[in-house]
Image (tube, rainbow, N blue to C red):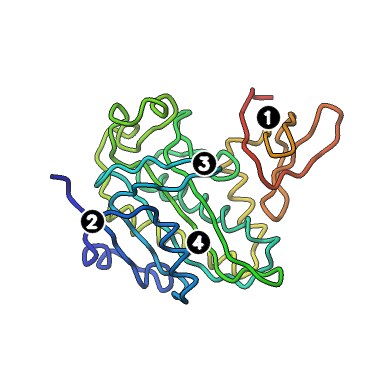
């Protein structure tokens, strides 16, 4: 029997003022993002966290399913109400990515890399992913949900065959069991720290940290979107978190969305 998360234990370890002030813990759920979006629509306060031991239909990007075995990893969604225009919503994914990266570094002494826009890798293995969804009106964000999945203690050998070649877990990489409650408390603390920096308008500071963790900058990449695919060198980010791609012609495109493949290091 796996040790399940306990709310009282989590709260004892938590030192945040906003993020995690309310936590809703489910043993089984279809998707924490789906539940959080419904709670956001019904007026749940900013910082509410939806946490689950397992998901039957965990959401990944582009409609993919996030593999979510019970009692081994972390699956959570955070409800936010940032007073920002839609053009800045991508920066919340940036905030989440650096929060996850910093938590992993502090918890394991291993420095991960962020593959734009929202995947966290160690040694070419994906250990975490982020999915941001929102509701908007009049070109402003009404509320936003950040879904985070982190592979902490799962055995990769037990994962579905189609993800074994790419997925990793912190336990496998660090060679030790990760205390999930301690890791969660640290993650929520890091998230609150960077979210408050974002709300204070320190966009450059946020983007500098994101750039420092980037595993994409300097790579030749292929970007696929509904409009087709383009190739070039990832050369930076704009202040909204968009990826700057330099084509062979010298033209620089700003990529706001798409699926990217790292082809080679320039």
Left or right? Give the position of 236 relative to 105. Answer: right
Spatial CA distance of label 2 from label 1 is 40 Å
Which residue is denoted by mark 4 in the rendering? 145
| N-term mark: 2 or 3 | 2
Q: Give the image location of residue 25, x and y in percent.
A: 29, 62
What crowding class fits label 1: few (fewer than 14 Cα within 10 Å), some (14-19), or many (20 or more)? Answer: some
Quadrant of the frame with the N terminus: top left
Identified at 58% across, 65% down, the residue is 135
Q: Measure the alpha-carbon separation of dots 3 and 4.
A: 17 Å
Q: Are marks 4 and 1 in contact (CB under 8 Å)?
A: no
Mark 1 or mark 3, earlier in chain: 3
| Residue 249, position as x, y percentages in the image | 86, 28
Q: Residues within 10 Å of mark 4 (few under 14, many from 20)?
A: many
Question: Which residue has dot 3 on it?
Answer: 119
| Label 4, label 1: how far apart the Cα atoms are | 28 Å
Does residue 207 appear to the left or right of 11 in the view shown? right
Instruction: Report the mark closest to the observer, 4 or 2.
Output: 4
> Label 2 belongs to which residue?
5
Residue beneath disc 1: 222
């Amino acid at each position: 029997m796996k040790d399940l998360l306990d709310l009282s234990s989590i709260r004892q370890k938590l030192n945040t003022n906003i993020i995690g002030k309310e936590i809703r813990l489910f043993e089984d759920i279809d998707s924490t993002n789906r539940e959080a979006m419904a709670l956001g629509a019904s007026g749940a306060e900013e910082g509410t966290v939806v946490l689950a031991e397992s998901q039957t239909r965990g959401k990944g990007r582009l409609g993919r399913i996030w593999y979510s075995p019970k009692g081994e990893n972390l699956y959570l969604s955070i409800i936010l109400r940032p007073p920002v225009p839609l053009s800045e919503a991508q920066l919340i994914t940036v905030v989440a990515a650096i929060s996850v990266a910093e938590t992993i570094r502090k918890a394991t002494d291993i420095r991960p890399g962020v593959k734009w826009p929202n995947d966290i890798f160690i040694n070419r293995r994906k250990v975490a992913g982020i999915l941001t969804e929102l509701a908007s009106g009049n070109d402003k964000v009404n509320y936003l949900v950040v879904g985070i999945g982190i592979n902490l203690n799962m055995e990769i050998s037990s994962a579905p065959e189609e993800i074994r070649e790419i997925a990793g877990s912190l336990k496998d990489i660090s060679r030790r069991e990760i205390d999930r409650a301690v890791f969660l408390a640290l993650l929520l603390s890091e998230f609150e720290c960077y979210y408050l920096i974002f709300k204070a308008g320190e966009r450059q500071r946020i983007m500098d940290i994101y750039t420092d963790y980037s595993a994409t900058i300097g790579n030749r990449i292929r970007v696929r979107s509904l409009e087709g695919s383009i190739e070039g060198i990832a050369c930076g980010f704009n202040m909204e978190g968009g990826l700057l791609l330099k084509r062979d012609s010298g033209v620089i495109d700003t990529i706001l969305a798409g699926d990217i493949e790292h082809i080679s290091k320039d």
